Every structure is written in C-alpha cells, then in structure tokens.
Image (cartoon, helix red, strand yellow):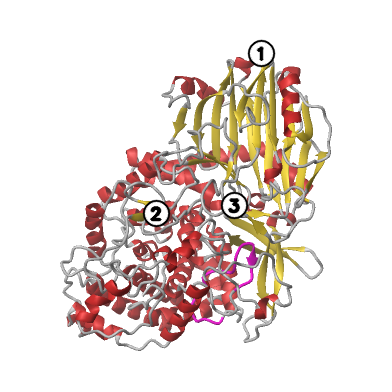
C-alpha cells in the first residue's frame, strides 16, 4: 500500500487554491487514458486566461468538475471534444463527485470530493481524494512494455480506485463509474443518423461493455475519431459489483438514491446513455479496491499499400488489411480478460519503468534542480508519444494471422493526420531506442518496404505513406517534398539502430536495404552541400534555399552511409562516402559561419540570420567524428545571447521554438550552462501551463502561447509523437555505451583537418582558400540533375496541399495505380499560402544580398518566393 502511505504528505503539503498539490508540476494537461490515436483522454488544467485565445478548457487541474477531453481539446478545426467519464463516491448516504461533470448537468448539483494531490509518472497519473474523511486514490495507468510487444499492443488502459481502509472504518462507502456514447462516435449530436449499440458480457471474472456504431465505417475518421471498432469498458468482478446501462440521469440518480445499481441492460435510446458500474464496499469490507479498463478494439486497424511484384517496375499493387498484434494471441474477449487479470503484474512493471525513467533522466544531466526539471519533462512525454503508434500484423492467404509480419504505423496527430511521417518519427526516435531499438526498426520498415517496392517514383525518400489509417502511398510521387530531410533521416536512424543492436543483428538488415539507402545517399551528394529551395521538417516556416541546418543533416547522412557500407564490406563505397562528407563539412563551415564568426547562419546567403543547429545531433550520436568542436562551441556560446523566457527561438525569423529541437540542442551543448538553460526554460514553459492542451511542441518562446503573427489562425501542434525527442540526452547516453564512449574514452570531435573555423593547420584545398562569397558562387553554379524534378514536386505539392483526403478508401483494385493521395487540410498547411516575401531570409529579402554580389538565380521559385 505504498501509494496510500503518502496521504499524510498530501494532506500536509502545500496546496494551490483548493486544488491540492501537483507533482512534479501541474502541466497544461494531464494524461488519463492515453493508449492510441483514438484512445486519448486528457484532463486540461486551464493554464492562462490571458492567453490568445484564453486557455479556459480546464478548471485548474481538478479531476472533478469537468469531463475529460479528447486530445483535440478545444483547439483547431475539430472543436472542443469531451468524453463522458464520470466518477462518484457515496459516503454515509452523501454522494461526492471525483471525476467528470455530472453534478449540475445530468443530476442535481452536489459536493466534489476534495482533491488532495495530483501526480504523474511515465505510465501513471495518480489523484488522492478526501470525501467526508474517507481517503481514496484514483490511478490512471497505461502500461508500457518495452520488451513484450504483444502486451504493448493490447489497446486498453487501466483505471484503479483504492479506498484507504483505515479512514473508511465506521463509514458506509459505495463507488460509481460510467462512460457514455461519446467514446463510440464523434457524431454525438446525430444519434438518429449514427446509432450505436451495446453488448454486455460477464466472462471469467471480468464484466465488460462492448460499444460500437450500428453501421461501422471502416477506415474512416470523423473529427479525428475512428468511426469503427469496439469501445471496451470493463471491470474486474468482485463482491457487490453492479452493472447497468440506461440514460445517464437514470443510472446516476439511482446510485445517488441507493448506492448501488440494478443489474439490467436497457435499450440504447438516443444520446446521454451511461454504461455504469457500482461497487458497495460496505457489503464486503476487506476488499477495498475497484479495477476498470477502457480502450477500443478495431478490426482491422489500418490498410497498407503493397506491391504485387515488389522491386520491379510494375505499378501493380493491392491494399492489405492490418490487424492489431494482440490478435495473433487473443480474441477480443480473451484480450480483455487477460488485461484485467494482468493488472498486478502490469502495476509492478509500471512502477519499475517509472522509477527508471525518472532516475535515468535526473542522472544524465547531473542531478540537482535541472535533473528534476528534465525528469518532469521526460515522464510527461512517454504516454503521449507512444500513443501515436500501433503495432500491426497481416493475415496469410488462409486467413491466419502472420505474427512474423509485424509493422508499426504512426499517426502524426494535430499538425495533420499523415501516416508514418518520416520527419515525425525522426524526432520521436530517442524515446523508441531508449525503450527498445526494435520499436524504431518496426517503425522504419513500412517506409523501406514502400520505397523499395517500385511504386514510389522519386529518387529521394518518401515523406509519408498517406493519411491515417489509409496507407495509400504516393505512387505519383507528389507527397510533401522533403527530399534531403527524409533521405538523411532514414540513413541516420538506420545506423543508430544498427549501432545499438550490434553487427551480428544489424548486418543482414543493412544488406537487405543497402540498395535503397545508397540511392538516397547519392541524392544527398547532389543536394546537401547547397540544398535547393525546399522544405525541412519545420515546414510551417515555408521553403528556403541553402539551409545550414538541413545541409549538415545531408552531409551526416553521407558519412553515416560510409559506416553502413563499411559494416557490410562495401569498402570502396565506404571510403568514397567518407571522403565526400569530409570535404563537404569543410566547405559547409566556410559557407555557414557568419563573417564575424559569432554563430552559424540560418541560410548561407543571409549573414545576419541564425538558427538552432539541432541537426548536429547526427554527428554526435552516431560517433561520426565529422564536425570539429569549434562549431559546437560557437553555437554553445551564442544560444544564451538569443534565449527568451521559454527557450531559444528556432531561428531568427520568428520567436517560436520547438521543444524537441530544444532538447536536441541541449544534449549537444559543450557547457553545462547552455545545456541547463534549454532544459530549465522548457521546464518553465510546461510548468507555467500557458496552454491547456496535451504537450505542445511548437510555441512562442517569449510568451508561451501558440504561434501567432504573422499567421491567422494560430498553429496548434498538440499531442504529437515528437515529444519523444525530449529523450535525446538518454538516447545519446545509450548510443555512447554501444559505441564504447565513456569518461575514460570521451567522444572525439571532428579532427583539426576538418576545422575551417578554428583555422586547423592541416586544412587544405583550393576551394577553401576562396572567400565565403566566392565559394558559395562556385558551388551554386554546379549543375544538379534532380533540381528540376525537385522544384516540380514542390510546386505540385503547394498547389494541392489543402486538398482533403478521401473520406473512405476507394476500391482495393483501383486505389493504387490511379489514385492521387491528397494531403489532409490542416492548419499548418494552410499557412504556407500566406505571403511572407518581406521577411528576413525568405522571398525577395532573401535574394537581394546575393543579387548585389552578382549571383544569378539557379533554383526555380518556390511557393513563397
């Protein structure tokens, strides 16, 4: 009863305006049941009524008094979507509310239980309450099983209520919990058009409601919700447990009046239905807890494009139904029963992982206040990031599940609904490899398969596979063009995975995918040193040519390809890639550093520009020893001079920043001061709770608001997988161990022969003797065979980026050769059409300095030029 023993501490702790204590902080939103793209229940805390717009969705972090919110909260085109989930406790015939907003809404207003404390860990959110002297704990727990993929794939989350038996003595105590139809469909105001039904079963010690639409629409979303599948609301059998469904006024009032429910299953009639359980603790003292589970089983999960003749020039393909990995081991009934029966085992696993994440996070940055701050950030990131992933399997021709064909698919969340977006699971990878490198391999596999299939026509890596849950692919090649970004990302992640698992495991995989990676590397050689006008992962900022940060990613990708080639015995290619990357990094320094040698520029052509150089991470985490320390030191000294209240802006164009890139820059800082600055100011952002949504990764570094001007509407990046990037300090620590880097064998930065900035004595080469302007002019004049194709793709994407995706999949036979996947219309994409020609480093203002030096435009105009 470890959790119960902390009641006294909660009672005596510092309280916040009647809200109790918050540990480690009161974040913008607390995760409740956060298990998958469609099972995502949060408690908005309500951070800042002075924000624009006011963050008024929450009520200060109290579990009672508001219904939990779906991840969309009140932001964006999907509106404020609430999930009916209510909790009541009856003590000596007086009923108190501990979750939801039933009082004053569906039943007469009554008292809320006093919330003593709220605490979150990596896997749990724990509330402690007092109701008329009876103390009780409410725990929302979503297990994370890094080394058990079957358990990890079960789409359920726990709700556990424990009554403190000592305080409950001499009291009559009953408990109530229900959900409503808002978990089933987002068409909640249209019951007559979108009816649903319920099925109740009591099997093997587990009661369960299965709730679904009468006519499911497979592979269809509405307001980001799945319009197919079985919502599951289960309870562990125990003495004196009751179950009833009816109108929520009926079930809740019955509990208020009697403390129990009649065990009846009534017809679902209209909206406002409750699917309820009640427990009478007084009837069986000595058993003082109640266990519930919430989630959704879908059959199937997603559909996935596969080539009929992979690796050929044939464009013939088919759509494959993919199922939850759990289905290879369980039926839905069996999975529900197993999950409930596994609670005590899962609880031990969660406590162990929680302690590990917190301990590792504190230690990796040296402990102290900054260690506590970093742990507060990482622990809040785990459930949000993992909930965007789904473990899937296929069926063979006989209809049997094929557990040997496991793939993970990702939903991008909020920025749009793209599926398996490469530059989204790239910032996510630090969490994945911290937990288990196998997660990263399974996320990358669909990208490898599709690009190797012969269906994708471009030489660079695809951006995504479609719009969730439909992986239709981009057989016309008109996906969002991030050619250097995605090609570099895949090579860097592949080598990172390989170094963690070792040559024995990695080499067969590297050989299998060497051909496509070599194709990407050859493209990087063409377009990395002087990147054409293109998008990077920060696509909300628009296209830009000659991006310093993007260029170093491409150069690192070439160097990483050299390591991969060496591992599989391609020694000639290995030497070639290493030589090219070494030559490029010297020229890159010459082009990227401002003329006063105070910082690296955002873009080569603008000496006054600057940016957060987070892509140096590839050099450091992969032990490439490519970039000299002088470059790291230059940035380390510069960041504090441009830091704002909540962090360092992403670049000189705007005050916004990205939380994932903040932690990446922190992890490669060469001084503790700069490292801690990034961590402490990100902690302040989440602690001040300027929003009331799940963790946002894009915000104004000056105010903590969502990004505003020059954009209208605002950009809302919430609940996204990229917060897994907050684990970069821990990912580097794990990579260093694999690469045998330690305090006795520290990381060796790029050699002096690479150090143009520091004036290394061994730096040679005619090109390096040129001035910065002369070198830029010479390199820009070199022909790029792919440039016309790149710009054509960019133009096509810009013209069609706001096209809505199909509402349902076309027929399986026609979908692939003719269909053109449309990008989901999202807030961030809509912003690209906003004119920005007067801003620094973009459009006309970006070109004028080059024009004055006599340069001629080489690149085609992008949409913002």
Point 69% across, 57% down: residue: 324
Q: Which one is in front, 517 or 190?
A: 190
Q: Which one is in front, 486 or 218?
A: 218
Q: State which mark lies toward you, 3 or 1.
A: 1
Residue 865 in percent (x, y) is at 36, 75
Instruction: Note whether 609 is above or below 108 in the view shown.
Output: below
Residue 782 in percent (x, y) is at 32, 88
Q: Quadrant of the N terminus?
A: top right
Badge 2 crowding class, 10 Å Cα cut-off, few under 14, some 14 to 19, many 20 or more, is many
Residue 828 in percent (x, y) is at 47, 61
Which residues are drawn in magenta?
Answer: 457-473
Principal SS element in the magenta part? loop
Side of 371 where 127 appears, left or right: right
Q: What residue did someone put label 3 on?
A: 147
Q: What residue did someone put label 2 on?
A: 707
Badge 1 crowding class, 10 Å Cα cut-off, few under 14, some 14 to 19, many 20 or more, is some
The kind of secondary structure element at disc 2 is loop
Side of 719 where 670 appears, left or right: left
Q: Are marks 3 and 1 in contact (CB under 8 Å)?
A: no
Point 49% across, 61% down: residue: 424
The kind of secondary structure element at disc 3 is loop
Q: Is residue 63 visible?
A: yes
Residue 819 in percent (x, y) is at 65, 76
Instruction: Note whether 57 is above or below 312 in the view shown.
Output: above
Q: Which one is in front, 436 or 371?
A: 371
Count the marks: how many? 3
Q: What residue did someone put label 1 on?
A: 171
Q: CA distance from mark 2 to mark 3?
A: 38 Å
Q: CA distance from mark 2 to mark 1?
A: 52 Å
Q: State which mark lies toward you, 2 or 1.
A: 2
Q: Are marks 2 and 3 in contact (CB under 8 Å)?
A: no
């Amino acid at each position: 009863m470890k959790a119960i023993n902390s009641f006294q501490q909660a009672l005596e702790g510092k309280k916040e305006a009647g809200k109790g204590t918050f540990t480690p902080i009161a974040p913008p939103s607390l995760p409740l049941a956060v298990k998958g793209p469609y099972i995502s229940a949060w408690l908005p805390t309500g951070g800042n009524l002075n924000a624009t717009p006011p963050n008024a969705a929450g009520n200060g972090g109290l579990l009672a008094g508001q219904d939990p919110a779906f991840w969309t909260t009140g932001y964006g085109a999907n509106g404020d979507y609430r999930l009916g989930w209510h909790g009541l406790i009856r003590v000596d015939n007086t009923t108190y509310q501990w979750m939801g907003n039933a009082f004053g809404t569906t039943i007469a207003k009554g008292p809320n239980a006093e919330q003593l404390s709220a605490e979150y860990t990596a896997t749990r959110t724990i509330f402690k309450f007092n109701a008329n002297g009876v103390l009780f704990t409410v725990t929302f727990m979503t297990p994370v099983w890094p080394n058990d993929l079957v358990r990890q794939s079960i789409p359920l989350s726990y709700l556990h209520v424990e009554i403190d038996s000592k305080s409950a003595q001499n009291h009559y105590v009953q408990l109530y919990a229900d959900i409503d139809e808002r978990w089933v469909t987002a068409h909640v105001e249209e019951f007559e058009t979108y009816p649903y039904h319920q099925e109740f079963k009591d099997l093997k010690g587990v009661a369960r409601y299965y709730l679904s639409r009468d006519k499911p629409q497979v592979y269809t979303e509405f307001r980001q919700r799945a319009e197919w599948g079985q919502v599951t609301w289960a309870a562990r059998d125990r003495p004196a447990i009751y179950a009833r469904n009816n109108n929520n006024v009926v079930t809740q009032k019955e509990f208020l009046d009697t403390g129990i429910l009649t065990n009846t299953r009534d017809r679902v009639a209209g909206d406002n239905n409750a699917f309820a359980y009640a427990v009478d603790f007084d009837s069986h003292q000595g058993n003082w807890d109640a266990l519930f589970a919430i989630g959704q089983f879908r059959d199937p999960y997603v559909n996935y494009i596969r080539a009929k003749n992979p690796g050929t020039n044939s464009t013939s393909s088919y759509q494959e139904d993919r199922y939850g990995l759990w289905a290879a081991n369980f039926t839905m009934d069996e999975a529900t029963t197993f999950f409930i029966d596994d609670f005590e085992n899962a609880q031990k696993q969660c406590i162990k992982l929680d302690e590990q994440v917190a301990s590792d996070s504190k230690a990796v940055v040296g402990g102290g206040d900054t260690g506590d701050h970093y742990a507060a950030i990482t622990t809040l990131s785990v459930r949000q990031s993992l909930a965007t992933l789904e473990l899937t399997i296929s069926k063979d021709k006989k209809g049997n599940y094929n557990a040997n064909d496991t793939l993970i698919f990702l939903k991008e969340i909020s920025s749009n609904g793209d599926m398996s977006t490469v530059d989204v699971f790239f910032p996510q990878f630090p969490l994945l490899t911290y937990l288990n490198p196998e997660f990263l391999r399974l996320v990358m596999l669909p990208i490898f398969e599709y690009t190797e299939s012969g269906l994708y026509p471009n030489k660079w890596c695809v951006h995504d596979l479609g719009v969730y849950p439909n992986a239709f692919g981009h057989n016309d090649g008109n996906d969002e063009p991030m050619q250097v970004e995605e090609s570099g990302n895949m090579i860097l992640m592949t080598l990172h995975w390989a170094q963690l698992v070792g040559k024995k495991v990695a080499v067969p995989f590297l050989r299998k995918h060497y051909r496509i990676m070599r194709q990407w590397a050859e493209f990087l050689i063409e377009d990395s040193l002087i990147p054409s006008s293109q998008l990077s992962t920060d696509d909300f900022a628009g296209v830009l040519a000659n991006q310093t940060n993007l260029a170093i990613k491409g150069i690192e990708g070439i160097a990483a390809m050299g390591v991969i080639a060496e591992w599989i015995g391609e020694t000639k290619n290995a030497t070639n890639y290493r030589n090219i990357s070494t030559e490029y990094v010297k020229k890159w320094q010459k082009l990227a550093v401002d003329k006063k040698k105070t910082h690296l520029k955002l873009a080569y052509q603008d000496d006054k520009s600057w940016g957060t150089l987070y892509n140096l991470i590839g050099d450091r985490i992969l032990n490439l020893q490519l970039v000299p320390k002088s470059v790291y030191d230059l940035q380390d000294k510069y960041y504090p001079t441009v830091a704002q209240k909540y962090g360092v802006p992403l670049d000189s164009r705007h005050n916004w920043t990205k939380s994932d890139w903040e932690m990446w820059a922190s992890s490669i800082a060469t001084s503790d001061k700069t490292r801690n600055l990034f961590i402490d100011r990100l902690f302040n952002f989440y602690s001040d709770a300027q929003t009331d949504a799940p963790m946002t990764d894009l915000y104004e570094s000056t105010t903590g608001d969502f990004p505003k001007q020059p954009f209208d509407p605002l950009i809302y990046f919430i609940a996204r997988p990229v917060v897994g990037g907050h684990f970069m300090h821990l990912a580097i620590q794990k990579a260093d161990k694999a690469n045998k880097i330690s305090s006795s064998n520290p990381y060796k930065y790029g050699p002096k022969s690479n150090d143009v900035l520091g004036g290394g004595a061994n730096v040679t080469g005619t090109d390096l003797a040129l001035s910065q302007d002369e070198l830029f002019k010479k390199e820009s004049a070199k022909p790029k065979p792919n440039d016309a194709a790149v710009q054509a793709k960019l133009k096509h994407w810009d013209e069609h980026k706001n096209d809505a995706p199909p509402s349902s999949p076309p027929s399986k036979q026609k979908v692939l050769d003719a269909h053109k996947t449309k990008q989901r219309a999202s807030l961030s994409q809509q912003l690209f059409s906003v004119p920005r020609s007067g801003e620094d480093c973009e459009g006309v203002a970006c070109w004028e300095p080059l024009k004055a030096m006599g340069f001629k435009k080489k690149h085609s105009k992008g949409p913002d030029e």
